[in-house]
Amino acid sequence: MSRFNLTSLFLVTSISLSFYSCDTLNKKDETPATDYSKTENWLSLPANGSMNVDVFYVYPTAWYKADPLEPDFCAIDNPIMLTGSQKAFNSQATAFETAGNIYAPYYRQADAAFTLTLPPAERWAVIDSIPAKDAIAAFDHYIKNYNNGKPFILVGHSQGAQVLLILLNKYMSEHADVYARMVCAYVIGYPVTAEFMNASKHLKFAGGADDTGVIVSYNTQSPSVAPGANIVMSGEIGLVINPINWKRDETPASAEESIGSNMPVDAQGNFGLIPNFADARINLAKGVLECTSVDENAMSQISGAMGPGVYHSFDISFYYYNLRENGENRINRFLEK
């Protein structure tokens, strides 16, 4: 698989790391949330919502500073974010298009090159300002105006995953009736720690392939990545479930067991099923999901800014069709209740 074929997919998570001041941390956020009654503030807003289940998707970092003098948060109509978020939607959210109606708001993002240089607590404070404010406002608007009491799935990756953690911690603790309709939250590409779960007693982490009302999470990397070298993890130990065999222990799942990956298959960047591409094994000590079956050098050419062997950009793509099947399975189990 060539670098050219993969570039279009991973533009949305490419990061040019540089130094930024911490002025953002010292400013009280007093900006109002984005107005989600306006249709232009939605990346995906189904016309009729005809399916019996909904999917609420929060995209990963789709914007980066083109100039260090830019603000640390982008505008809701930033053209770089609009383009990048559509690419992310096409390569990630579509895994769940068979599960339900996909709702996806635009939200004002933090510059990843700034946030990823911060320690976890400060990183959390940045995302818990404008990005989470927008996403929670969007979700609340969705619940009150579009959901109509349906079960729903949450899906988020990278910055979108961290935003979802804040939504789960805050909004769901205050809206038990809404949480009761949550089939599953796929919080992928950001560590869900034991400390977070202990501080969020109303939440549950997935224990298997079809439990409901739970969080599914993992962060993908090569076994060669040293502890602490994955900048996304920032030294934290994440809870992990294997997206092929749906186990919580270190039982390996071979690439042959995988339903398949969704990767570019031609020079035009069109995506398609590649079977038997990515294996998966949990490393409990590191709190990550390890993949050994792919070409580390080829993958690193695309997501090299994350560091060699860090497959952050591929978290959903590697296990795309397994995630699709799993979403359907959890919905079926939920509807049986």
Image (tube, helix red, strand yellow):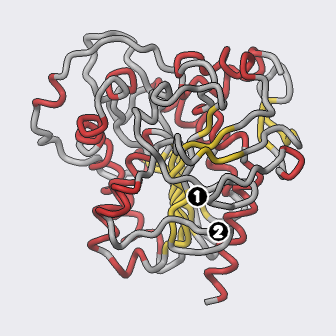
Name the amino acid type tagged 1. Answer: Ile
The residue tagged 1 is: 102
Q: Quadrant of residue 74?
A: top left
Secondary structure category for the residue under label 2: loop
Q: Quadrant of residue 77?
A: top left
Residue farthest bottom in this picture:
337
* Mark 2 closeness class: few <14, some 14–19, many ≥20 residues within 10 Å: some
Instruction: Work out whether residue 37 can be spotted.
Output: no
Q: What is the x, y in percent for residue 215?
A: 51, 62
Q: Nearer the viewer, residue 150 or 250?
A: 250
- Which residue: 72% across, 57% down? 324
Name the amino acid type tagged 2. Answer: Gly
* Mark 1 closeness class: few <14, some 14–19, many ≥20 residues within 10 Å: many
Q: What is the x, y in percent for residue 247?
A: 67, 61
Q: Nearer the viewer, residue 81 or 122?
A: 122
- Which residue: 68% across, 57% down? 97
Instruction: Work out whether residue 116 can be spotted.
Output: yes
Q: Nearer the viewer, residue 150 or 195?
A: 195
Image height check: is 14 above or below 41? above
Looking at the image, residue 177 sits to the left or right of residue 325; the answer is: left
Image height check: is 86 above or below 101? above
- Which residue: 31% across, 37% down? 120
- Residue 255: which numbered mark, if any? none
- Identify the image quadrant of the C terminus: bottom right
The residue tagged 2 is: 208
Q: What is the x, y in percent for residue 44?
A: 54, 50
Looking at the image, residue 77 sits to the left or right of residue 122; the answer is: right
Q: Nearer the viewer, residue 288 or 141?
A: 288
